[in-house]
Amino acid sequence: MLRHDAVLFDTFFAPNDPALMLFTGGSTGKPKVWSKTPRNLLAEALHLSKKFGISPDDLFLSTVPPRHIYGLLYSVLIPFICSARVLDGVYTFPREILRVARDYRASVMVSVPVHYRVLKVDDLRRHDLRIAFSSAGALNKEDAVYFHSKTGLDIIEIYGSTETGGVATRHCLRDGESWNPLSTVDWKILDGRLHVRSAFISPTLSLDGDGFFATADRADSDGDQRFILRGRKDDIVKIGGKRIDLASVQTKLKKITGVCDAMVIALPSKTGRQNELAALVVTHLDALQLRRHIAAVSETYTVPRRIAVVEEIPVTATGKYDRAEIERILLNYEKEKKLKIES
């Protein structure tokens, strides 16, 4: 029953009219804003709730805020549609996450790769968890293996974007590189780029004649039913007349024993006339050792000219790499290192 002083809003949104503006995570630069309709959001939430068997018995624990698409869908709309419960808070510290999962018997965890990394602790337990989601970036396989060894759960990764909504899912350990498109999403690959069509796509996107949107992601088919992502279209850069795949260099860095994480970008060279590769790396190795490892398995022109060794790679509140802060660190790393030595 409504209170006598309750405020009633007379605003009505038709199912296909823009009703909400959402910011992207800003991982590839300045955040963009995309409109979403009630049909976009509720159709996706309904589909996902059925796909994952969410029920009123579930209790959601979220480590991401609901102001972006992933947190909004998985910690607000899906529980809302299913009458499931949600813990009141966004939990980001490892001990806090473990305590809340144990004390409140959470059954669904909504998290991001950076939080699964910090959960590599001895007292990690499954308790009542039955599903663990991850999005906002690629999950490190070592982190997924550790989580599985302690909980028996194979983390479910979600692939999508603010503008497209959800596109595909995969069990990190079972499916490997391959993504399984949602049953409500049509897809095709043209000129190496993934194109998608669904009811979840923002109404402001430009579509082709068949209703498909060309994403910025490169992909290959893996049979008729699955695809493998190969990085973003803008990950291919030209340096010294050579075409270089940033994602490939980043993957090679991450495979080096002793490297915990890495991010590779292209920055203007010191002369400003062309670009050069730069890498931010979490490791106990030094820059010279990293360059030698890369040079041993790849062409010399793919070896980053600038390498900054750090304790952690900056991320945004949504768990994505903070591109602006990464650029700032790489641009100023040598200068700051020199100042520390002189002082």
Image (cartoon, helix red, strand yellow):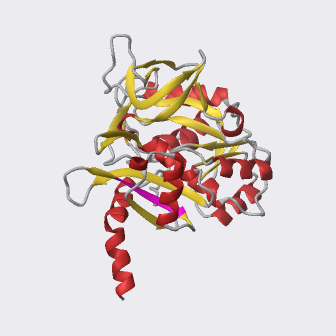
Q: Nearer the viewer, residue 165 or 336?
A: 336
Q: State the quadrant of the N terminus.
A: top right
Q: Nearer the viewer, residue 311 or 293?
A: 293
Left or right relative to 77: residue 209:
left
Left or right relative to 135: residue 13:
left
In the image, residue 84 lies at what x, y percent?
A: 66, 40
Q: Main secondary structure of the magenta part?
A: strand
Q: State the quadrant of the C terminus.
A: bottom left
Q: Is residue 106 visible?
A: no
Q: Residue at x 31, y 48 (%)?
A: 30
In the image, residue 17 lies at what x, y percent?
A: 35, 25
Residue at the far bottom in the pictured view:
343
On screen, residue 198 above or below 94: above
Left or right relative to 105: residue 94:
left
Q: Is residue 287 visible?
A: yes
Displayed quadrant of residue 35: top left
Q: Nearer the viewer, residue 279 or 48?
A: 279
User: Does 279 lie within the magenta span?
Assistant: yes
User: Does 76 lie within the magenta span?
Assistant: no
Q: Magenta part of the protein: which range?
A: 277-282
Displayed quadrant of residue 68: top left
In the image, residue 148 lies at what x, y percent?
A: 76, 47
Displayed quadrant of residue 210: top left
Q: Nearer the viewer, residue 250 or 30?
A: 250
In the image, residue 173 lies at what x, y percent?
A: 70, 39
Q: Residue at x 46, y 21 (%)?
A: 199
On screen, residue 75 above or below 219: below
